Image (cartoon, coloured by chain):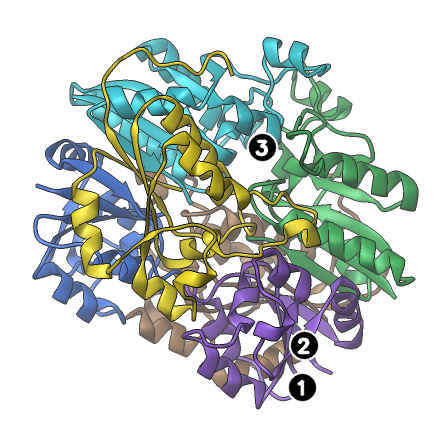
Chain colours: A blue, B purple, C brown, D yellow, E green, F cyan
Amino acid sequence: MSTLNIINKSPFEKRTLDQCLKRIGAGDSVLLIEDASISAVSGTAFTEQLTAAAAQSKLYVLQPDLQARGFNDASLLDSIESVDYEGFVNLVVTHERVHSWL
Amino acid sequence: MSTLNIINKSPFEKRTLDQCLKRIGAGDSVLLIEDASISAVSGTAFTEQLTAAAAQSKLYVLQPDLQARGFNDASLLDSIESVDYEGFVNLVVTHERVHSWL
Amino acid sequence: MEEEEYQGGEVKKFLYVNRRLPHGTIYALESLETVLIGAAFDQDVSMLFVDDGVYQLKKEQAPESIECKNFSKTYRALEMYDVEKLFVERESLEERGLAIDDLLVDVELIASSDVKALVDEHDVILSF
Amino acid sequence: MEEEEYQGGEVKKFLYVNRRLPHGTIYALESLETVLIGAAFDQDVSMLFVDDGVYQLKKEQAPESIECKNFSKTYRALEMYDVEKLFVERESLEERGLAIDDLLVDVELIASSDVKALVDEHDVILSF
Amino acid sequence: MKLAVLVNEGPYQHQASDSAYQFVTAALRTGHEVMRVFFYHDGVNNGTRLTTPPQDDRHIQKRWSALAQEHNVDLVLCVAACQRRGLVDEGEAKRNSKDATNIAPGFRISGLGQLIEAGVEADRLVTFGD
Amino acid sequence: MKLAVLVNEGPYQHQASDSAYQFVTAALRTGHEVMRVFFYHDGVNNGTRLTTPPQDDRHIQKRWSALAQEHNVDLVLCVAACQRRGLVDEGEAKRNSKDATNIAPGFRISGLGQLIEAGVEADRLVTFGD
């Protein structure tokens, strides 16, 4: 796999999600952590954009961050895979490089 | 005058400008400081939105912040008034309350 | 805290505007600490939850998963401190796919177009 | 700084991604300090300016107006440190009403659609 | 008019402390009273005397300390925020068994009540943050 | 695999330091090496021993110090960032004439070169920030 892109801010607050998605491509993955985790919940204003993005890149969400904010795996978009911290480490290891979009 | 609203983040980075503008009205003013100062420059993707907002509220920009970032009063939208720190103090004093949109 | 007393007698109307998610930053938690002190000082305290601030009131928060404090139950205790005016913006909930049943406490729903009137009623606006 | 030496011999390709305005936060300044050290360590260093990062290269910055350091001239000195690969995204300039003539230094313009290929060429991505 | 200021971010990382300082000096210049600057959240980090910024840069802490001395501006660090971030005066060192202090001259550590009081007593409260 | 981590924000204010800590412990649990955690920008504030967080909350600094001791993780604070924010060890106190130190056990202050070295020597560098 190519690049693991990490996003940590809510798309309602910052434009990071847009800015990342438009600059990545085949083989790239996106991991949603911290405040960005809520964008993985279905039924928000960003559901359509994330569903479209999932057709191109693999999307992951950090489950402990989601749980902290009151959501569980049942609330997730089908196209997003939930990982724990060990899964996070595994994503880092299996991609060639990590790009944190700060 | 009613409320002095202060915005300090770039509209390209955060959605604060949108979030503020849709919730204020007659008698309210907006002061653009720090990284928000660049939204007062004409010819950006936010020019139209700010021009429309200026029809409803009085818009100000903190000149020293604009100058720090390489712009001068000649780059400003016509509908935005430039103030220095003493002008900032005067805006605080002449409005009933201050709302910093953090 | 014994030093936390105010004898001034004057009462102002404070509006706490909460616009951020809990846990990603400390603002929600430290804002709540301010609200409690403000109430203890017998000030007139209202809270407004807009934008990502509505997530602060989401049920079933479990920040034990990230070894952080679960302060969400404090919102339930606000009533005991006479902080009874919690306003939530309807549009902020809707954009996030949330409904009033998802929230921990009873709140008053207001429209985006009512926010200005609420702000105008207050003397001091604190937004963290 | 005498401790700043690296004898490892290995060379990696570092890409510094600059996405924020200067002066509002320290990231632009402290990122530049890292770039200079990276170059001193004989690493292969490129810089990419996208989104608000393009403002870092704006001519005529005068942060003396806010009593801050004018570090923008350091971008001009990068060449002396063999940091010669400065990439700027065309779309980021356009959205902000900026043109290449507004920039302090010579840069290579790239399209938004070329960013991925640039990232893919590098081993380490640092974005502050 | 009587003004109060709230600073929510530490020195150098964000412009908040710079903006607050420029605002306060402009207010004093134009004849207003600044009854208090309250430092909350990371803002308490403005009150450490242990910084050594580059010589060609502004010294944010010293600038605040000078303001306290010359214009009698009350600089208050929130005690709860100080405990989370490691800002310590003599009293806090004793209370929490710390072996050092780092508070700078002109600053004092007190409760959040000082912020509420500032909100009540000042005609306007202006917040600077991230 | 050999990993390195960069932390750009201080404790409590942002989740960055928490996320980094959870990531590092998960990496160690799954058999990876964490050769260094580099603290830059406000991240250096993680390295003060003067914090007293509420008793029912996590103690971020102590958690890092324990990790250094138990797993030999190298915790490095950037010297230039420390000088701007007031993080001081014995050497810095002497060099800059400071009357106190505040660095916590297990942390050391060094140059930005340590970050570049981590980028070169680690197989992956992961950044946590604001």
Is B95 on the left or on the right of A65, as rendered? Answer: right
- Give the residue pinned by disc 2: B3
Q: CA distance from mark 1 to mark 3?
A: 40 Å
Q: Which mark is residue B27?
A: 1
Q: How far across and down, in percent of the image, does residue F6 sit?
A: 36, 30
Counting residues from the start of the chain, the first of labels 1 and 2 encountered is 2
Q: Chain of mark 3?
A: E
In the rendered image, the quadrant that contains the N terminus of chain F is: top left
Are the two marked residues, 1 and 2, in contact with CB atoms closer than 8 angstroms?
yes
Please determine whether, in this image, residue C127 is positioned above or below residue D82: below
Question: Count the marks: how many?
Answer: 3
Q: How far across and down, in percent of the image, does residue A71 sit?
A: 26, 55
**Mark 3, secondary structure of its residue:** helix
Q: Chain of mark 1?
A: B
Query: Which residue is more in the foreground, E77 or F93?
Result: F93
**Discs 1, 2: same chain:** yes
Q: Residue at x 41, y 47 (%)?
A: C23
Within 10 angstroms of label 3, few (less than 14), some, or many (20 or more) residues? many
**Mark 1, secondary structure of its residue:** loop
- Give the residue pinned by disc 3: E85
In the rendered image, the quadrant that contains the C terminus of chain F is: top left
